[in-house]
Structure formats: structure tokens, C-alpha cells
Image (spheres, rainbow, N blue to C red):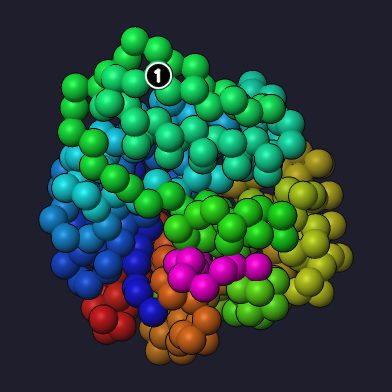
Amino acid sequence: MRITYGPWGETLAELVEAARAAEDAGAEALWLPELHRSATVPAAAVAAGTRRAQVGTAIALAFTRSPMTTALEALDLAELSGGRFVLGLGTGVRRLNEDWHGVRWERPAARLRETVAIIRHFAAHAASGEPMIVEGELESLRVRGYQRPCPSTGFPIYLAGMGPVMTKLAGEIADGWISHELCSPAWLRERALPLLRPGVDAVVSAACSIDDDPALARRRAAGLAGFYASVRTYADFFAFHDLAREQDKVIAAFRAGARADDLGAAVPDRMVDALTLTGTAAQVAERVAAYAGHATTIKLTPPVHGLAPAQIRLAQARIIDLIKELT
């Protein structure tokens, strides 16, 4: 099982420094999310600031850019990284697309399938000068009289999925599958892996909080669990873990006016324990080991929701220390 990391930084310089420290500690890939920052600009900074580790987006939003723009950015990142780039794409949820980004939400699985087909077609043919025509129901590409006079380094495409439809799509067409930030070993075994074809890189995202005081480690991760519990779309996931009532309480707090980043107080320890890796370094190492034999890659990330930068830095430093031990 590959040990990989999602670095954090209050500034881009700090983020690159953290990525470099994780690479030096033995992380085999470095993943950049799209929430508080874009995914592709930090990926470029990390690619330029590291030497060996893969650099991936986990994830870039698939529908907030055109497929051609996504392909161009991926080609540039593949060149910049010397072939180390992985394009990780996800749909996000309806609220994020429509309310945050003002883009339509229509048959997301079918649209993502067509988006990936266009990205691959463009990346393979952009330098040829030939017409590039891909007709889809939801996404199309019609390019004539275009030739990209730049190096065309290939890149794998990973897809994020939580529910069965998106996970199955990743298993059918992607080089890898990226789990949601909350993914227990039981969910991985029972709900995800049966839908992935052999050879797909199964990347488990694991929110991680380490402290000599397990209770303090648990509370640092509560805000992250609360942020995602506020999303009604994830009801099946929380019900699978017997946490439906607990999710309802978080949603009630959110609707009552609590910010999405400040829902940790509504999250019980039981939810944190079920969905994140918290505790002492030895306890978290044991929790990581529970994925071995099932996941091919684990992506460790620090909690960020509802935490001050100093707390995130502490959580990040402890994870990087753990990576040294694990690798």
C-alpha cells in the first residue's frame, strides 16, 4: 500500500514546503484539493517544488472548467512535473455546482463519462493538427484548424466516487478511484472495491489527527466530519455507519445558522471514531494498517475545518512524522 499525502499551507510557499517535507519523509504522491484553493495552481507550485513524488489533483472539479481547459491544464502540469502528474476529477454535489459555481447539474455520471472522453481525445490529438470532434449528449468538442505546438506528456485520470454510480464509473473508465475524505475500511471493502475492476488504483482518503492526548486529536477532526455531515447527499454513507441520527443533528445545526466549517460541536465522538483516523501515533498507525490488503494507496490529510492555522500546522507535522515511520 502506497503512503501518500495531501499537504496544507496558509500560503503557497508553506504548502510547497509541506509537500517537500512529505516527499522527503517518503510520501509517494502529493495530492491537492479544490476547496479553499484551486487544485491546479497549487499542483503547479508543488510540481515545481518537488522532485520524485507524483503530483495529483484530489480532486479538481470536473464541471467548473470546460473539458478542453481541463485537458490543457493537465498537459501543462504533466510537462511541468516531468510526467509525474495525475489528473483526479470529481463532480462535487449539486449545491456546490449550482450555488457556489453557477454551473448546471445534469446527469453527473453521464456528463463525467463524456468529459473524460473529451479530455483523453484532446490530449491524444491536440498536437496533430487534425480536427478533434467528440459528440456527446451533455459535453461536446468541435475543434478545427488547431495544433498545439507544445510537448504532450501523457497523464492518468483518476475519478472520485462515494456512491455506487460514480464508483462504478471510476471502475469502468478510470486509471484510479479516489475515495471521499471520509472512508472507513468497511465502506471500502463492502461498497467500493466490488465496483472496481482489477488494476484500478484504489486511493483511500483518510483524514488524520494525531496527538498524545487522543481526546484532543479526536476534537481536531470533529469539524471535518461535521462539514461533510451537513451534506444531505451523503445520507446513505452515514446510515451505513449507523450514524443517520447523528447526521440529522449536524444538518439541524447547519440549518440553524452554524457555518459549515464550525459544526464540530455538533459531532459526537462516535462519528469521529468511525470516519477518521485519530489518536496517538501508534493508534493511528494501527488504523492505517487496517486498509492494507484492500486499498492500493492511502492519502493522509490533516483536518482543516474549524481549526486555526497553528492547530493545522501541528496536525500536519505529526502526520509527516508518521509517514517517516510508515515508510
The C terminus - image quarter:
bottom left
Residue 227 location in percent, x, y? 64, 51
Residue 257 location in percent, x, y? 76, 38
Position of 292 relative to 64 (above/below): below
Residue closest to the eye, 136 or 216:
136
Residue depicted at x 74% and y 64%: 237
The magenta segment is: 195-207
Q: Does the magenta stretch include residue 148?
A: no
Residue closest to the eye, 223 or 46:
46
Residue 249 location in percent, x, y? 82, 58
Residue 99 location in percent, x, y? 68, 27
Residue closest to the eye, 268 or 300:
300
Position of 238 relative to 51 (above/below): below
Residue depicted at x 76% and y 65%: 238
Identify residue for label 1: 131
How many marks do you count on the picture?
1
Position of 262 relative to 266 (above/below): above
Q: Is mark 1 on a helix, strand or loop?
A: loop
Can you name the residue that lies furthest to the front here?
130
Residue depicted at x 32% and y 78%: 322
Residue closest to the eye, 293 or 17:
293
The N terminus - image quarter:
bottom left
Three-letter residue code for mark 1: Pro
